[in-house]
Amino acid sequence: MIIGKVVGTVVTTISHPHYRKRRLLVVQPMVAQGDQDDPDFIAVDHSHAGVGDTVLVNREGNGARQVLDLPGGSIISVIVGIIDSVNIET
């Protein structure tokens, strides 16, 4: 699981059957100050998130397929929740 910020959407005209009728969002991982930035990635939306939302993402394929009930699915990342706030104490 990672925390990220939704920074965009993906629109396709043709897609794999496992992605049909599912929203695809571009997620930018949030990292601690001073850590190396991770690249943005695409995730299936399962929580009605939108651009600007802070989200919780399952980036493990088997868990993502279980959330979407697609045992043989070709899905790796799925947004499983919208986060209201994050507080990090040092």
Image (tube, grey):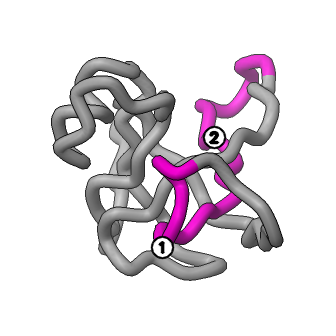
Q: Distance between the residues labelled 1 and 2?
A: 25 Å
Q: In this view, does 17 lie to the left or right of 34?
A: left
Query: Eyeballing the image, is 17 above or below 73?
Result: below
Residue 29 sits in quarter: top right
Q: What stretch is highlighted in magenta?
A: 17-36
Looking at the picture, how far across and down is residue 76, in whole percent?
A: 48, 28
Looking at the picture, how far across and down is residue 12, in whole percent?
A: 79, 67
- Identify the secondary structure beneath mark 2: strand
Residue type, numbered disc 2: Pro
Residue type, numbered disc 1: Lys
The label on residue 29 is 2
Query: Eyeballing the image, is 37 above or below 68?
Result: above
- Identify the secondary structure beneath mark 1: loop
Identified at 35% across, 35% down, the residue is 58
Q: Which of 70 and 33 is in front in this view?
A: 70
Give the quadrant of the N terminus: top left
Identified at 38% across, 80% down, the residue is 48
Tell me the residue that label 1 is attached to: 21
Q: Which of 83 and 69 is in front in this view?
A: 69
Give the quadrant of the C terminus: top left
Identified at 48% across, 64% down, the residue is 54
Mark 1 is surrounded, within 10 Å at the Cα level, by few (under 14), some (14 to 19) or many (20 or more) other residues, namely few
Mark 2 is surrounded, within 10 Å at the Cα level, by few (under 14), some (14 to 19) or many (20 or more) other residues, namely some
